[in-house]
Amino acid sequence: MINTKVEEILNEQINKEFYSAYLYLAMSAHFDEIGLRGFCHWTKVQAREEVDHGMIIFDYLIARNGNINLKQIEAPQADFQDPLQIFEKIYEHEKSVTSSIECVAYMSEDECDMATRNFIDWYIAEQVEEEATVFEIIKKLQMFGSDKTILYHLDKELAQREYKQHKYA
Ligand code: FEO
């Protein structure tokens, strides 16, 4: 049986991951509207990964005989601007997710739940990768975003992203 405080923070993290999926889907719809099909694809793939992140915690809680306490998912904003501002927003969002993952790590250590402490390491590494990928796109948009030809090529590049399902165990 899992520690109740750890159980609660993991349930909150499930909610944050599903909110992330909603946010990326809202961005994907916006990119579709403005004709950036590669950006639309990239954010849609990211939304699927966020669902995986939530499901991995869901499956982990069940494996630990924990209670699932699903919470209401907040609606994401629907008014977006240019790709650079959207990716800056993504970067800020992912930094906040990193902080919440770190809180899970701290709490599991505090509560001597080493199984969860070990489990959450995958998320810590995933956040490093996500932040780095997003920052890389921001740098390109900062340098070339006003150049429509470069934006066209970046859109083609982002269209190449492949979805790989993440699973628990
Ligand atoms: Fe599940 Fe983007 O962190």
Image (cartoon, rainbow, N blue to C red):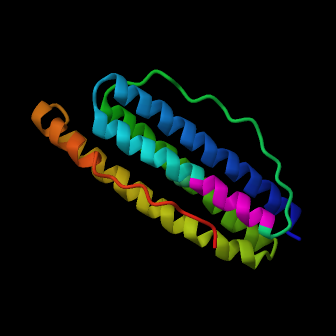
Whole-percent x and y of residue 121?
59, 72
Whole-percent x and y of residue 49?
51, 53
The residue sitting at 85% across, 63% down in the picture is 66
The residue sitting at 74% across, 57% down in the picture is 10
Vertical relation: 150 (above or below) 62 = above
For the C terminus, give its image quadrant.
bottom right
Taking the magenta stretch, the answer to whether it contains residue 60 is: yes
Whole-percent x and y of residue 159?
28, 45
Whole-percent x and y of residue 139?
25, 47
Give the magenta part as a residue range: 52-62
Q: Main secondary structure of the magenta part?
A: helix
Residue 89 visible somewhere in the drawing: yes
Vertical relation: 168 (above or below) 92 = below
Which of the two residues, 59 or 12, is positioned nearer the viewer here? 59
For the N terminus, give its image quadrant.
bottom right
Taking the magenta stretch, the answer to whether it contains residue 57 is: yes
Answer with left or right where residue 51 lies relative to residue 158: right
